[in-house]
Each structure stands twice: as structure tokens, then as C-alpha cells.
Amino acid sequence: MTVTTTRDFAMSTRDHIVRGFKATLVSRAIYMVSSALLMFILARVLNPDGYGALYWAIGILAVVQLFADLGLGKSTARYISEYGEAGEGQIPHLLKSAIAYKLIILSVVSYVLLLFHEQIAVLLGDPGAAPFLAAGVLFIIANSFNVFAQIVFQGFNRLEYSAAVQAISGATRLVFAVGFVLLGFGAIGALFGYIVGYALAGVIGLALLYRRFYGEYEPAENYEEGLSRRLLEYSVPLTATRSANVIDKRIDVVLVGVFLTPAAVGFYQLGKQIVDFVLAPAESLGFTISPNFGEQKAAGQLEQARQIYETSLTHTMLLYVPAAAGLVLVAEPFVTMVFGADYAGAVPVLQILAGFVVLQAITNLTSDSLDYLGRARERAIAKGATSIANFGLNIVLIPTMGVIGAAIATVMTHTVYVAVNVYVVHTELSLRLARLGRAMGLVCAITAVMAGAVWIVTPMISSLAMLFGAIALGTATWAVLAVASGMLDLREVRAVIR
């Protein structure tokens, strides 16, 4: 009887993950396709200087947003996941506390930014950025609620709602940003397009949260003593982790703008955006599986959690190690043919960041999972230390090596962070390292053969048709080898697609 129950539990968990992965992947596909179109159109219309000015401002605003968001979204999601199993009556109280905290913090940060936006622009060496920072008040408020809704839906393990909000934000951002630019409003118009897109997604997300969740739970007569305080306390390590994430993902863009030129920011940002596009499937899988670790730990099902993590990691590496190798090989023709010769400076950045693709794919699977396993503190310490190192390396390498230095700093420090994350997961789940090592060896062998096939045809690429032909050759070689080696089961692929 116990064996049947465990098997049923495993099957139910797998089906739930597959459904969530499908919904999240579809939304990420919409979001990333809209992002790719936005990237392509803005790069073509704004030129490297305008493109760099826009994303330098967004990088600064992302840093400011740290103080407006803290880790409240993730902390709220964690406690919703925990109290969803027992103590559902506390959930309405949790949501009210989270919104109240968020409104207070947002008000303070927005007021300070509005008051000192001109001084901040001068301090960073570009007084012309002041209008972007003033408009940034609206950007921060809109994006804060957009992201909050997505994360809280993750805590409820209702990923279809997170997916819907993200898809809406991506599609509306594309429509309005491109529309405002084509109307002649330039880079500032693109920023307002971001604001409108995020605002619409945030309003829809909060409305769904209120109608479908808050109203469905009968509030407990008494708010559990200390829960509101714990909600705020747990946001502290999450804030540290998120701060470190922003340093990794945004502060390098800001520093490139401080030390170099807007065009250099454009080159670096373009490389990072291409990497983000490639990483969408891994981000979808990590977002999908992470709430299940908290549920399974609470239910004592650590064996099931280990199996999910190992399987996810193996399949992620099967996809991303060959993808990174292919990216290095086709980076030059891809960038110059798709975005124009003016963006050739982005090629070495993209080639170096190919290593970051593999590292970030592992991070996307691992980091959120640690939060739900209750190991946010360890993750925060690791992230904080490596982010400080990343900041220091950027200051040293950008003035001496340019945008390549920023890319090198990112890869070096993220390698250490990934190693620590995987170690902490191992201490929780006792990963089967020998088995994982054999799988990684097979992945590397598949990658070597695929890369050889692409390398042979790369010198012949002289048009977009030949470029996509080379990519298709690499993909076909990878698929045949993955299936022949047994690492990719076509029956499982068909089961996921259906």
C-alpha cells in the first residue's frame, strides 16, 4: 500500500511539474519572442548610442528597484507555500501584510528618486540621463507589482497565472515601446513603452490574485503571532541575494556606461540579451520545479526531490552545453547579419558569455530551489560574496579591457557561485555524483561531435539562409546523438508535448 501511495505521489508530482513547465515555457516563449523582436527593432532604429543610453538607464533603475522591492515577493511566496499545506487561514493575513509593506517601501524609494534624480545623473557622469530617471519612478512602481504578482502565484504553485502575467508584460511592452519609438519619441519613448507594459501586467496580476486567491481563503480569526515579523525577516537574506543578482546582471551595464561610451553599453547589453533569450527554457524549468522542493521537504519526500533535481540538471546540460558551443562558433555571422555591422563589437562579448549560458542554466535550476528548501541564508552569503568580487573585477577589468573585461568578470565570479549552490543542494539531497559525472561526460562527447560539424561549415556562411542552415545542421547532429546515446527519450518528449 505504501509503495503504491509513493508511486502515485511521484506520478502526481511529475504531471504537475510537466503542466507547470508547459504553461511557463509558453509564456516565456511569448515573452522571449517579444523581447527578441523588441531587441531587434530597437537596435535597428536607435543605433548603438541610443540603444546603450536606454539600457544604461534601465540598469540604473534596476539597482534602485532593489530598495523598492527588497525580498518581499519571494518571502511571501515561501510562506504561502508553507501555509498552503496547513494553516490556509493565515494566507489572507500574509497577503495584506506583504502589500502594506510594499506600499510603504515603494512610496519612500519613489519619493527619494524623484527628489534626487538630477543629482544621481550628474554623479554617474551623464546629466542627460535625468529624464530617464524621473520617468523611472513610474517604471519602478509598475515593474514592482508586475514581478510581485508573478512570484506570489509561484508560491501558490499556480504557474499558469505567473505565465499569463509574464506573457502579457512581454507582449504589451513590445507594442508600446516600438509604437512610441516609431512615433518619434526615441529612447525615452521606449522606456515609457516598458512602463505601460509592466503597468498593465501588474494590474491584471493583482486583480487575478485578489479574485482567484485572496477571496477564496477564509481568514483565520487571529493572525499567527510573529508571522508578519518572520515575513519581513525572511526577506532580508532574499534581499541580499536579489541585490547580488542585480549586481551580476545590471551593475556591470551601469559600470560600462560610467567608464566607457553609450555604444559600448549597447554592445554589452546586446550580448547579454541574446544570452537571456537562449536561457528561457532553463529559467522556465527552474521556476516550475522550485516550489515542489518545499512541498516535498515538508512531506519527507527527499528521494523524490533528488530525482527531480538530477533529471532536470542532466537534461538542462544536454541542451545548454552544446548550445553554448554553437553560440561561440556562429556569434560573428549571427550578430553582424541580424543586427548589422555596427554591432560587431558585441561578438567577443557574446562568445565569452557563452560560458555564462551554461552556468546560468544551472543557477536557474538551483537558486530558487534553495529558497524553498529553506537555505536562502547560505545562498545569500554565496551570492553576496561573489557579487562583491564581480563588482571589484568589473572596476579593474572594464577600464583596461573594455566590454570584454565585464564579460570575463561575470563568468569568473558566477563559476564560484554555481559551485557553492550545487554543494548546498548536495548537502540537502545527497546527489549521486558519480552518476551525474558519467552523464556530464556523455554530454561533452555529444557537444564535441556537434561542434565539429558546425565548425566545418562556419567559414562558408555568407547569408542568413546559410547561417540558419549551419544552426540546423548543429541541431540535427545534436538530436541524433542525444537520442542514439539514450540521453533523450522520444517517448518522454512526446508525453511532455501532448
Image (cartoon, rainbow, N blue to C red):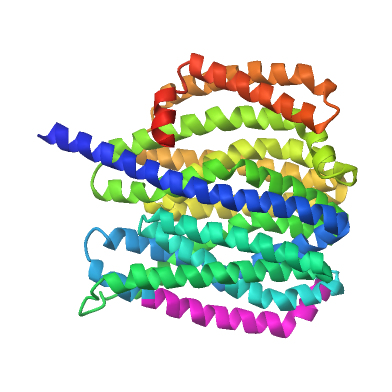
Name, please, the residue furthest toward the left.
1
Which SS type dominates the magenta stretch? helix
**Left or right of 170, for residue 52:** right
Residue at left offset 84%, top offset 30% = 463
Q: Position of residue 386 (x, y in %)?
A: 61, 49
Task: Let me know if residue 241 appears in the view.
Answer: no
**Left or right of 47, for residue 200:** left
**Left or right of 93, for residue 273:** right
Q: Nearer the viewer, residue 200 or 62?
A: 200
Q: Is residue 61 above or below residue 222?
A: above
Q: Quadrant of the N terminus?
A: top left
Q: Position of residue 192 (x, y in %)?
A: 71, 71
| Residue 236 is inside the magenta segment | no
Q: Position of residue 15 (x, y in %)?
A: 32, 40
Residue at left offset 21%, top offset 61% = 86
Specify start and end residues of the magenta stretch as a single range: 96-123
Give the quadrant of residue 481: top right
Residue at left offset 79%, top offset 65% = 181
Residue at left offset 75%, top offset 28% = 329
**Left or right of 120, for residue 241:** left
Task: Let me know if residue 234 appears in the view.
Answer: yes
Q: Nearer the viewer, residue 105 or 162?
A: 162
| Residue 113 is inside the magenta segment | yes
Q: Is residue 112 above or below residue 341?
A: below
Give the quadrant of residue 226: bottom left
Q: Nearer the viewer, residue 51 or 491?
A: 491
Give the quadrant of residue 169: bottom right
Q: How many marks?
A: 0
Q: Quadrant of the C terminus?
A: top left
